[in-house]
Structure formats: structure tokens, C-alpha cells
Image: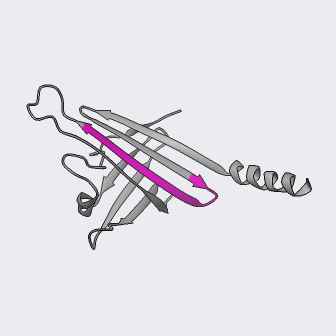
Amino acid sequence: MKKLFLAMAVLISGNAFAATDHYVLHDGDYVRHLKITKIKDDYTVSANVDFESSAQETNNVHCSETISGKAKSTSENELVLKKHSESEASFCELKVQLSPNGAKIEESKDCDTFTVSKCHFSSEGKELVKVK
């Protein structure tokens, strides 16, 4: 019984140091979602983009892409996720600029190997709003 309580205490105390923030941007036909989880000094970033062409366009295009992994803090307000492509000899690099109310995402040119069609992770200078 003591071991059970000890195991539960370890799990609870480990989760006490975890924080997850969500960011969302609705921009025309695009919806971008960013999730950042911090456990102690380790960051995990997950970026998702959904695109569906509007009803006015003749060819209905849809895509939904996600990239996630461990990120490094390069400064107080910047995280960098670098993900290796399984099919190409390239890396997709996402730079996330954080502000008190949101986040902006920039992507490297090699992120094209992780997406199709009109999907891209970059927020194109627009800020994803932090969900509170």
C-alpha cells in the first residue's frame, strides 16, 4: 500500500511542474493551432494547420497537417522545433515567437516536405491568440 501512495505522489508532483498553453488563429480559410507544453525546462511543441478552400472556389482543396516534437528555448521568448523529414534529407524548422497574449510562427523552406497543397505552418506575421 505504501508503494501505491508513493507512486501516486511521484506522478502528482511531476505533473505539478507541467504547463500547457494553446494558441489559435482563424485566418480566412486557415485555422492554425499551436500547443506548447513545458515540463521543468523541457518544451514540446505541436503545430497544426487546417485549410479548406471557400465555397467560391471551383476546386475544393482541403488539407490538414501536424508537426510536433521537442523544442529548444533559444531566448526568453523564442522556441525552435527542428524536425527531420523521414522521406527527405531535410529538416523543417519552426521558430515560435512568444508574447504575453499570443505567438507567431515562422517556418523554414524545407517545411514543404511536411505539408501538401496550400497547408503551411507559418502564421505569416499574424499572431495566434493565447487561449485562456
Q: Residue at x 32, y 53 (%)?
A: 106
Q: Residue at x 27, y 74 (%)?
A: 89
Q: Which residue is drawn at 31% across and 49% down?
A: 121
Which residue of the protein is positioned furthest toward the front in this rendering?
A: 1
In the image, the segment drawn in magenta is 38-51
- The majority secondary structure of the magenta stretch comes to strand
Which residue of the protein is positioned furthest toward the bottom in this rendering?
A: 89
Q: In which quarter of the image is residue 3?
A: bottom right
Decide which of 30, 6 is in the foreground and name it. 6
Q: Relative to 55, is 111 on the left or the right?
A: right
Residue 126 in the image, given as x and y percentages of width and height = 31, 41
Q: Relative to 7, is 99 on the left or the right?
A: left
| Above or below, 21 relative to 109 | above
Q: Does the magenta stretch include residue 106?
A: no
Residue 108 in the image, given as x and y percentages of width and height = 28, 61
Q: Which residue is drawn at 24% across and 31% down?
A: 28
| Above or below, 35 relative to 58 | below
Q: Quadrant of residue 25?
A: top left
Q: Quadrant of residue 29?
A: top left
Q: Is residue 46 magenta?
A: yes
Decide which of 129, 120 is in the foreground and name it. 120
Residue 87 in the image, given as x and y percentages of width and height = 28, 68
Which residue of the protein is positioned furthest toward the right in this rendering?
A: 2
